[in-house]
Amino acid sequence: MPERNIVSTTDAPGAIGPYSQAVAVKGSLLFMSGQIPLTPSGDLIQGDIRAQTEQVIANMRAVLAAAGLSPANLVKTTIFLSSMDHFATVNEVYGSLFESDPPARSTVAVAGLPRGVDVEIEGIAVF
């Protein structure tokens, strides 16, 4: 079985349940848990979908950096939205994460997200 390592950083909010910020499979893949708009100190960004998404992106960058990776290493992301009405704004902010060649992606609207937020993004990256 390949070695797996837990990735954790104080530059992103800690897990609020029984999960890790990310799990790395040595020399292969990083599985990043869904990031919501919580600051590293645990404050919830509410209201404006742009501000929520910017915080989610900041959290993603921090978790990737803790594993020695960058957004360029992402190969698949999933965006969860409280409403597809947020799609255009989230898509714009999300697009700023990549200089070129963005990863494969799915975007879905869901019945609810943790803490009543409007956006959550998870990702898989390669080493």
Image (tube, rainbow, N blue to C red):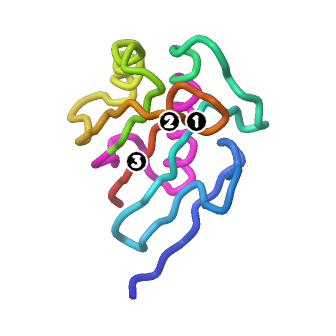
Main SS category, magenta section: helix
| Residue 89: quarter of image | top left
Three-letter amino acid code at the position of disc 3 = Gly
Q: Secondary structure at mark 2?
A: strand
Question: What whole-number distance in Å separates the C-alpha atoms at marks 2 and 3?
Answer: 10 Å
**How far apart, in angstroms, are the residues tagged by discs 1 and 2?**
5 Å
Q: Which residues are magenta?
A: 54-76
Q: Residue 107, image x and y in percent?
A: 32, 33
| Residue 119 is inside the magenta segment | no
- The relative height of residue 97 versus residue 77 in the rendered view (above or below) is above
Q: From the image, state whether disc 2 or disc 3 is nearer to you.
A: 2
Which residue occupies the foreground of this view, 107 or 100?
Answer: 107
Tell me the distance, in whole angstroms, between the alpha carbons under discs 1 and 3.
12 Å
The residue sitting at 51% across, 52% down in the picture is: 33
Which of marks 2 and 1 precedes in the sequence? 1
Above or below, comparing residue 121 to residue 99 in the picture: below
Q: Which mark is residue 46?
A: none
Find disc 2 in the rendering and name its residue.
120
Can you identify the residue that label 3 sits on? 123
Answer whether residue 71 is magenta in the image: yes
Residue corresponding to mark 1: 36
Q: Is residue 95 left or right of residue 5?
A: left
Residue sitting at x 51%, y 39%: 61
